[in-house]
Each structure stands twice: as C-alpha cells, then as structure tokens.
Image: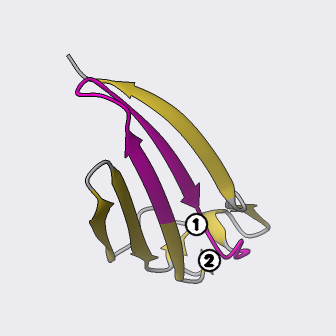
Amino acid sequence: NTPKNSFSLWTTYDIFPKTTIGGGAFYVDKVYGDVGNTVYVPDYWRYDAMASYKLSKNVDFQLNVQNVFDKKYFDKAYAAHYASQAAGRTILFSTNFHF
C-alpha cells in the first residue's frame, strides 16, 4: 500500500495583516494491494484549502477543507476484492495556542 510516487505542493498568502489563505495539491501514484502487484487502485489528485485569522500574538483560528471538490477515490487496496474509499470533503476548525 505504498505508492511508487507521491508529492504535494502547498502555498499560503497573507491577504491582510492578520488573515492568511492557502491551498495545496496532493498527488498519489497507484497503490498495489497484493504481493504480485496485479491488483491496484488508480492514482489520484486531492486539493485542499485553508484560511486562518491571528487573534493575538499567541492565538489563531484556522479552518481547513480537505478534498475541496469532494472527489471519490480509493486510497488503499487489499487483496483481489477489497479497497477502501478515501474520506470525502472534510472540514476542520482549530484554535492554535503558541507559547
């Protein structure tokens, strides 16, 4: 279940002094699910985005959206008749404390 090739590209941009937006793309090559490398799930791209707001020197809020376009794809293959579907669009909100 390890792809031969994978990579990601991510960037952020400060649109205001306390506000940042960002986005990224992830590519994962096909993943084989058996020893003979005959069963696999195809390669895929996933796109993510984020926005953050710096409340103070030590606290910021962040919103992340993974799989922005809610693409359906498989991320793991197991033997000849089973593969797991990756999570759909996921939205995460976090509060970060910096010490």
- x, y percent for residue 44: 54, 81
Q: Quadrant of residue 98?
A: top left
Please indicate, yes or no, whether residue 36 appears anywhere in the rendered image. no
Which residue is label 1 attached to? 33
Q: Residues within 10 Å of mark 2 (few under 14, many from 20)?
A: many
Q: Is residue 86 magenta-colored?
A: no
Q: Residues within 10 Å of mark 1 (few under 14, many from 20)?
A: many
**First in residue order: circle 2 vs circle 1:** 1
Q: Residue at x 25, y 53 (%)?
A: 17
Q: Is residue 75 left or right of residue 36?
A: right
What is the distance, in whole Å, between disc 2 and disc 1 at their CAs? 8 Å
SS category of the residue bearing label 1: loop
Quadrant including the C terminus: top left
Which one is in front, 79 or 49? Answer: 49
- x, y percent for residue 67: 61, 67
Which one is in front, 45 or 57? Answer: 57
Classify 16 as above or below 41.
above
Which residue is label 2 attached to? 41
| Region in magenta | 49-72
Tell me which amino acid carries mark 2: Val
Which callout, 2 or 1, points to the residue nearer the camera? 2
Q: Is residue 91 left or right of residue 96?
A: right
- x, y percent for residue 91: 65, 50
For the residues labelled 2 and 1, say whether their Cβ atoms are less than 8 Å apart: yes
Q: Is residue 99 left or right of residue 6?
A: left
- x, y percent for residue 41: 62, 77
Tell me which amino acid carries mark 1: Gly
Please indicate, yes or no, whether residue 18 appears anywhere in the rendered image. yes
Q: Is residue 58 magenta-colored?
A: yes
Classify 94 as above or below 27.
above
